[in-house]
């Protein structure tokens, strides 16, 4: 008698099936992407084999070239897939929150701590750099939101650095695809214990709004970035 899978134990697609699904999305988003992946892999294989011919150890460099080609191909594939996913969610309300929630490094993200009826919003991320307020919306409208939220949390944050980042396409704003990289470059000002204490103080603050409803990439699975170096 076969057992039916429970809700928490549903089958997930295998590794190769996931890669195939991502490849299909990538091909639709950018027809040139997969040829670039294959070209980079084949180019790596050719270079490694040529090195083996020059030094007379072809028997060793052929399997090494296959492994190197696979690694390079997967790296290029991952980067192009990441760009495609950023392109899909760019401009949607909550796109920045989707990226923040999928970052590695012990970040605590609170979505839409502030916002308005135009779906401009401010998200709060707490991590080793301190408090980062990330806005979504036109520069002319999100400035007051960021200023008001920074003032609201300044007493609870005490001496902790508070950064504000505007995500968007206006001059001086950061494109959604570069948000993760930008945050990873911030200095590590706090220890893990200080981050935990800061989170407790900020979580005690009342929320000024709920996340607005609409076409949001809440379930989007974003590629995870590198882990920040610990001190």
Image (cartoon, helix red, strand yellow):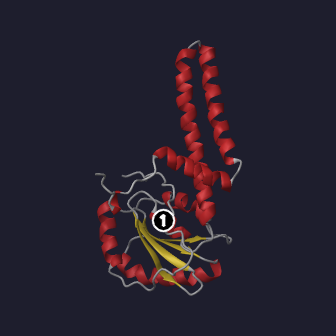
Residue 206: image x %, image y %? 37, 85
Residue at 64%, 26% (x, y): give it: 47
**Which residue is rendered at x = 66% and y = 45% of the image?**
34
Q: Name above or below for residue 26 compared with residue 66.
A: below
Up-down relation of residue 42 to residue 136 (above or below) = above
Query: Which element carries disc 1, helix, strand or loop?
Result: helix
Q: Is residue 191 visible?
A: no
Name the image quarter holding residue 179: bottom right
Question: Residue 15 at what x, y percent from top left?
Answer: 47, 45
**Residue found farthest to the top:** 56
Q: Position of residue 129 (x, y in %)?
A: 43, 63
Q: Residue at x 52, y 60 (%)?
A: 180
Q: Residue furthest right?
A: 32
| Residue 186 percent across, percent down from the top left | 48, 60
- Horizontal side, residue 149 vs residue 35: left or right: left
Q: Residue 127 sits in which quadrant?
A: bottom left
Q: How many marks?
A: 1
- Most foreground residue, 171 or 42: 42
- Crowd tier of the residue under label 1, counting other residues whose Cα lies within 10 Å: few below 14, some 14–19, many 20 or above: many
Q: In front: 80, or 229? A: 80
Q: Foreground: 138 or 18?
A: 18
Residue at numbered disc 1:
100
Can residue 72 be seen here? The reply is yes
């Amino acid at each position: 008698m076969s057992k039916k899978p429970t809700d928490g134990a549903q089958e997930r697609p295998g590794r190769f099936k996931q890669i195939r699904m991502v490849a299909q999305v990538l091909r639709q988003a950018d027809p040139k992407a997969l040829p670039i992946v294959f070209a980079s892999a084949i180019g790596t294989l050719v270079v490694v084999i040529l090195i083996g011919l020059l030094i007379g150890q072809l028997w060793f460099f052929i399997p090494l070239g296959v492994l190197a080609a696979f690694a390079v191909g997967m790296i290029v594939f991952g980067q192009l897939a990441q760009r495609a996913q950023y392109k899909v969610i760019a401009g949607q309300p909550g796109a920045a929150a989707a990226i923040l929630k999928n970052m590695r490094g012990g970040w605590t993200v609170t979505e839409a701590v502030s916002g308005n009826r135009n779906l401009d919003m401010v998200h709060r991320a707490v991590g080793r750099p301190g408090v980062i307020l990330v806005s979504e919306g036109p520069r002319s409208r999100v400035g007051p939101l960021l200023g008001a939220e920074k003032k609201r949390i300044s007493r609870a944050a005490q001496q902790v650095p508070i950064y504000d980042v505007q995500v968007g396409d206006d001059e001086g704003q950061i494109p959604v695809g570069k948000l993760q990289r930008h945050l990873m470059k911030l200095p590590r000002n706090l220890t893990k214990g200080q981050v935990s204490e800061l989170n407790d103080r900020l979580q005690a603050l009342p929320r000024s709004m709920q996340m607005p409803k609409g076409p949001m990439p809440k379930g989007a699975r974003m590629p995870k970035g590198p882990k920040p170096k610990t001190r």
